[in-house]
Image: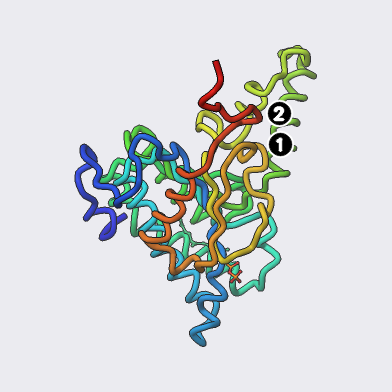
Amino acid sequence: MSRALATASSRTQPVLPVGLDAARLPAHVAVIMDGNGRWARRRGLPRVMGHREGVEALKRTLRLCSDWGIGALTAYAFSTENWNRPGEEVSFLMTLFERVLARELEGLEREQVRIRFLGDLEPLPPGLRELIANATARTAANSGIHFNVCTNYGGRAELVHAARRLAEQAARGELDPARIDEELFAAQLHTAGEPDPDLLIRTSGEQRISNFLLWQLAYAELHITDVLWPDFNEAALTTALLDYQNRQRRFGGVAPTPHQP
Ligand code: FPP
């Protein structure tokens, strides 16, 4: 991302904040970037200024995750429900996505970021769809962090879409329904090929999943912070990662005890 990512330090030896264990970083971090509107209102600014500042927070987060060796960052930029916002705000967001993509593509390429947009992209404005297709193609072979931007994304819609794809294959006689298992199902999701997020960060204090990655977050650790998204910075990300590293992940099993044979 032009200025921000261009300053990223060498990827060979990440310098992590004190206390973070490089060997136990999440491979995949997901973020619900909430609180842009409140950030703007507190400053007496129009809501859209919060979104503009939110882009800066996203660039910071991407650069930090990339620098620290986190494999994937998935951000919830626009939900299927966000079309219900005032028309002016929706148009602002679409134009913002276009501008950001056009402006940042060169930096993403330089920094080896692989960007993908997850969701139903059909209803997006044609200009944005073109930019998305171009950015996706131009960064597809990049070796760095996977940056997924969920745009017109809804978790339930994604599950329905996956179920329909499998049903169509079965109806054509190409798939025996008895063969459908979790792996086959996950291969039909927008996130196919990506490991599930280990950590979900939600800003601005709301304690909800909001139709985000319903399948993929099954075993994610949740970190909810009162920080508003535009204020999300290195300290806030470090706090989230330290919180994650203090959790004991059991995936439905039991915690190992020192006395177990
Ligand atoms: C939620 O805050 C934020 C959004 C709906 C938009 C987030 C989008 C970006 C930061 C831009 C990302 C752009 C690209 C191209 C990667 P809110 O409006 O719900 O805040 P509120 O809850 O305080 O009202």
Q: Are marks 2 and 1 in contact (CB under 8 Å)?
A: yes
Q: Nearer the viewer, residue 100 or 226?
A: 226
Which label number is shown at residue 44? none
Q: Secondary structure at mark 2?
A: helix
Is residue 244 visible in this depiction of the protein? yes
Viewed as shown, does residue 182 lie left or right of 104? right
Is residue 125 visible in this depiction of the protein? no
Which label number is shown at residue 161? 1
Q: Nearer the viewer, residue 243 or 99?
A: 243
- Ligand 1 shows up in which quadrant of the image? bottom right
Coloration mode = rainbow
Residue at x 53% of width, y 83% of height: 42
Q: Of the residues shown, which amino acid type is indicated by label 2?
A: Arg
Q: Of the residues shown, which amino acid type is indicated by label 1?
A: His
Task: For marks 2 and 1, give the CA distance.
Answer: 6 Å
Q: Position of residue 68 (x, y in %)?
A: 32, 45
Residue at x 49% of width, y 84% of height: 43
Quadrant (top left/top right/bottom left/bottom right) for the C terminus: top right
User: Compared to 245, does 187 lie above or below?
Assistant: above
Q: Look at mark 2 in the image and give the residue it sits on.
A: 165
Residue pushed farthest front? 259
Crowd tier of the residue under label 1, counting other residues whose Cα lies within 10 Å: few below 14, some 14–19, many 20 or above? some
Residue pushed farthest bottom? 44
User: Compared to 53, does 252 lie above or below?
Assistant: above
Q: Position of residue 38 (x, y in %)?
A: 56, 76
Crowd tier of the residue under label 2, counting other residues whose Cα lies within 10 Å: few below 14, some 14–19, many 20 or above? some
Q: Nearer the viewer, residue 140 or 182?
A: 182
Residue at x 40% of width, y 40% of height: 25
Q: Secondary structure at mark 1?
A: helix
Q: Position of residue 222 (x, y in %)?
A: 58, 49
Residue at x 55% of width, y 77% of height: 47
